[in-house]
Amino acid sequence: MIYLIAIFISYLLGSIPMGLLLTKIAGKGDLRKVGSGNIGATNVMRVGGLRMAGLVWLLDMAKAIVAVLLGKYLAGDAFGAWCGFAAIVGHCYPIWLRFKGGKGISSLFGVMLAMSPLVFAICGIEWLLVALYSGISSLGATIVFCLIPILGFVMGTDIGWAFLAIALLCMWRHRENIKRLIAKSESKIEWKWKK
């Protein structure tokens, strides 16, 4: 029962819509009604600039980190990874917003940081290099989704299955981006320091 409660708490943590809350506090309006309508950091950058997007990214990472640490404290690394997965589910399908949330990438990086700083560094450097070189954030993210199950299974079979579940969920949430990547019509990042 305590493990089920931990999974549910992790989901609720992930469900906190950091992007929506910060943009409303900053007087930027309802994030769901501008840009892509997404509540993640990329859309926050469109209305609040890079600094606000960075803050949202860190907060979305933090809620996943707390979930992973809770799971690791209760039952070890593998359960920590599954609590991280639950947090990402919450980020993507938040109960507070009728299950319409972000795409999970920032929370995914939070899970990786809490599970393995080395995995976080490998995927973070890959994403940054690809995003900066190509100008396409989703291309770097898609490569991360392919990398993390492999890195997870290197860490351990149970962790690998959790990382595979995370990768599949994030790929599903990025399915439209992936279609546009294949069609070579994906939009490039517009770096805006402030708004």
Image (tube, rainbow, N blue to C red):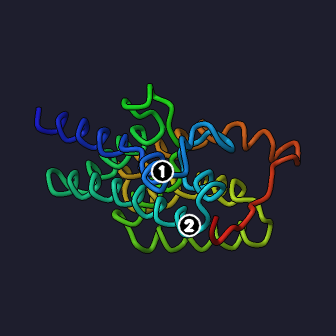
Is 186 displayed left or right of 113 in the figure? right
Q: Secondary structure at mark 1?
A: helix
The image quarter in which residue 7 lies: top left
The kind of residue on which mark 1 rests is Gly
| Residue in the image at 80% along x and 52% along y | 187
Is 116 displayed left or right of 106 in the figure? left
Q: Are marks 1 and 2 in contact (CB under 8 Å)?
A: no
Image coordinates for residue 66, horizontal then vertical, percent: 27, 57
Q: Residues within 10 Å of mark 2 (few under 14, many from 20)?
A: many
In this rendered view, identify the residue nearer to me: 49 or 88: 49
Residue of label 1: 19
- Label drawn at residue 87: none
**Relative to 95, is 53 above or below?**
below
Q: Secondary structure at mark 2?
A: helix
The image quarter in which residue 10 lies: top left
| Residue in the image at 69% along x and 44% along y | 35
Q: Residues within 10 Å of mark 1 (few under 14, many from 20)?
A: many
How many circles with numbers are drawn on the protein?
2
Position of the N terminus by quadrant:
top left
Is 136 displayed left or right of 99 in the figure? right
Image coordinates for residue 181, horizontal then vertical, percent: 80, 47
**Relative to 166, is 5 above or below?**
above
| Residue in the image at 69% along x and 53% along y | 138
Residue of label 2: 123
The kind of residue on which mark 2 rests is Cys
In this rendered view, identify the residue nearer to me: 88 or 1: 88
Select label 1 or label 2 by which is in front: 1
Q: CA distance from mark 1 to mark 2?
A: 23 Å
Image coordinates for residue 117, horizontal then vertical, percent: 40, 73
| Residue in the image at 16% along x and 57% along y | 73
